[in-house]
Structure formats: structure tokens, C-alpha cells
Image (cartoon, grey):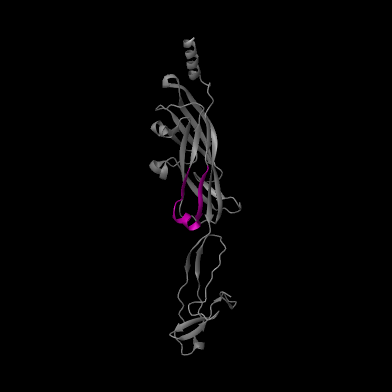
Amino acid sequence: MTARILWLLALLFFVPGVWAACSVATTSGAFGSVSSFMLNSTEQTTSANVLVQCDVVLGLLNNDTVTLTYTGASVSAGTRAALKRTDNTSITDTIPVRLCGQAGCANNSEIAINGSYTWNGSTLLSLLGSRRFTLPLWFRTTSGLNVSAGPYQVTFNFSVYYNICQVGLLGICGTAQTGTAATTLQLTLTVANDCIAITAPDVNFGSAPLVKNFPVISQSVAVTCTKGSVYSVGINNGAYANGNSRNMASGSNRLNYEIYKGRDQQPMGQ
């Protein structure tokens, strides 16, 4: 009787299809909120995971593999996915994103659309938790972008193939868990408004014998702000103001002046 039970158990482990196929899912990735100028100057990084969950305890051999094929994206730029505004679809700004199989896109691990990346051997072993593989993916924006502020999103499309040994009797390899599953992964980023530079050159009225002989000076204040943003520029009344009256000083002497915006003779700050 005991021998018969053992034989039936062995049959369960070695007959293909007895165990259910593994399931595949993903976690979402998020860059968080980044100012438009930080996005322009510095590549932003984040990560997410592909989860391969099986119904049985897994054992690993050198020929076990999990292969992710990058089949496409909801928005793309060349061979890369691209984040796009979700709150205003008429805005065409996009943020290309690199997808990599290793941190920092090391060892030429970037995956292009229609490309693939394979985990196997000792790498898989380090990512195995009894019945689940947690396979990390890394994402990097490209620098040099000039985009408007707002929420951005893209969806990655993947096909995941797995061929993994199932632990059989006495710890030896039983039936291989093999299959292919389609899955998606969502990535988000919020671009924040910012102003990084205000250039206000000095004003020099020159020299004149009488106040009425000083010329009108016309020049500009330059402001660098996020593309498409609404901003305001304020100028205070200066160090020697008397109420709303602006003054220059030479010792205890004061000379009144005013700053106007445009040609409408409307004083700045009033």
C-alpha cells in the first residue's frame, strides 16, 4: 500500500498539467513630483516589479528562465515608451523613458520595444521567494527635456515566458512550470511648475545737472519658468522707500524715481 501511494505521488509530480500555470502581475512605478528644470537637467529614476506567482514550491536549475518581451506601450517615441499628459490630451509634450533589466541600465541592459530580457540561473535564485519571483525593472527619463507641468502617464505592454523547475519527490526536479502570459505596467510622473532664474540688470541714469534732465531708461527683466506656466513678477519699493514712493539715496539725500510696466504708465506693484 505504501509503495502504491508513493507511486501515485510521484505520478502527480511528473505528469504535465497537474499543477496550474503560474500567474504574472506587475507593480506600478512612480517617479513622484519633479520640477520641470530638475527633469531637464537630471535623469529621474524609479523601479517596479514583475511578479511570477506559482502554485507549487519551485526549485531552480541552470536552464530555468523567465523572459520578458517588451511588446509595446500606450505612447512611444522611437523604441522607447513616452510619458504623456493625462489631464489635457491636446498637449503633445512627451517624456521618453528607458526601460532596463538592471539598476542604472548597467551592462547594456536597456530593453527596447520588441526587445527582451531574460533572468536565469543564480539571478533567478536570488529573486525567488518559495513560490514567487519578484523581478525588478528600472526606469530612467532622458535629460534635456522642456515640457509643461502636469500629470504624465504611460502603460507598458509585456509578454512574460517562464520555464521553471517544480520541486518533486526527494527534492529533485519534477514537472517544469512553463507558460506565457501578457501583462501591463503603469508608470507615472508629475511635472511641477518652477522658476529658476530672474535676471534684472542694474539701472544707470547717468549724470545730469538737474533731475528733469535724467533720461527715461527702458530695459527688461528676464524670467525663466516652466513651459506654458502662468507666473507673476513682483518688484518691491526698494531699500529707501517712503510708503509707496521709491527713492534712491546719497547719504541723507533722496531722489524719487518710479518703475512702470510696459507703456501704460502703470507703476509696478500698484
Residue drawn at x 48%, y 32% is: 132
* Residue 32 visible within the image: yes
Please say if 266 is above or below 70. Answer: below
Number of residue marks = 0
Q: Residue at x 42, y 19 (%)?
A: 170
Magenta segment: does it hold 222?
A: no
> In the rendered structure, which segment of residues is drawn in magenta?
28-47
Relative depth, front residue between 197 and 116? 197
Which residue of the protein is positioned furthest toward the top in this rendering?
1
User: Considering depth in this image, is 124 or 262 the residue closer to the camera?
Assistant: 124
Identify whether 212 is placed above or below 56: below
Q: Which image quadrant: the C terminus?
A: bottom right
The one of 187 and 217 positioned closer to us in this rendering: 187
Residue 215 makes an appearance in the image = no
Question: Where on the picture, by quarter, is residue 265?
Answer: bottom right
Horizontally, residue 124 falls left or right of residue 191, namely left
Residue 218, horizontal then vertical, whole percent: 51, 77
